Image: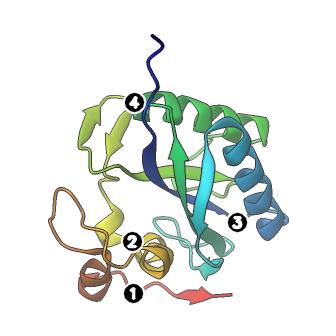
Amino acid sequence: MEMVQSANKSYLLTGGNMGNRAGYLRDASVNISFFCGKILRQSSLYETQAWGKTNQPNFFNQVLLIETTLCAVELMKKILLIEEKMGRTRNEKYGSRIIDIDILFFNDEMINKPQLVVPHPEIQNRRFALAPMNEIAPDFIHPVLLKNISTLLKECGDKLGVKKI
């Protein structure tokens, strides 16, 4: 008898600040649904000030909830291939980019591997990830911090601008 792989749920953050930002996020969504799994929910687009290296154009960000049969490490591999296919180059930390796709959460798993840390270790410090996440999943409980997204957003010390488009 064939084993049916159960579906995993993962929250992904897409973002970019070069060229047609909205178009690149749309392309990323299409690629994610083709290579990774079904998009169940998606936030609005948010325009956000650059984090880490602030002297660059504003980003567009969006959170997607996907259902996938991939494990977290395989999902990360597919995401890196999508970024590469879309022309992402990694030249400088926090530098400008066409597309960036991060795994924020994978089910309620805690993963700590050299190539992947889930939940995303900085989400509680980044308004640009929490605001769109809060739009589609305010009650989702962070499996390490044991607080919901709405609470994390209220407690977030990040003062960079984040506005819904």
Q: Are marks 2 and 4 in contact (CB under 8 Å)?
A: no
Residue at image position (31%, 76%) is 139
Asked whether residue 138 appears in the rendered view, the answer is yes
Label 2 CA crowd tier, 10 Å (few <14, some 14–19, many 20+): some
Residue 17, picture quadrant: bottom right
The reply, left or right, for residue 64 in relation to residue 3 is right
Residue to which mark 2 is pinned: 126
How far is mark 1 from mark 2, CA to CA?
Answer: 9 Å
Residue at image position (46%, 84%) is 160
Q: What residue type is labelled 2?
A: Arg
Q: Which of marks 3 and 4 is in front?
A: 4
Residue to which mark 3 is pinned: 17
Q: Which amino acid does label 1 sit on?
A: Lys
Residue to which mark 4 is pinned: 115
How far is mark 3 from mark 1, CA to CA?
Answer: 19 Å
Label 1 CA crowd tier, 10 Å (few <14, some 14–19, many 20+): few
Residue to which mark 1 is pinned: 159
Total marks shown come to 4
Q: Which amino acid does label 3 sit on?
A: Asn
The reply, left or right, for residue 121 in relation to residue 147 is right
Task: Give the mark nearer the N terminus: 1 vs 4.
Answer: 4
Does 46 appear above or below 56?
below
Q: Nearer the viewer, mark 1 or mark 2?
A: 2
How far is mark 3 from mark 4, CA to CA?
Answer: 24 Å
The reply, left or right, for residue 108 in relation to residue 30 is left
Label 3 CA crowd tier, 10 Å (few <14, some 14–19, many 20+): many
Where residue 144 appears, as percent x and y from the top left, is 16, 56
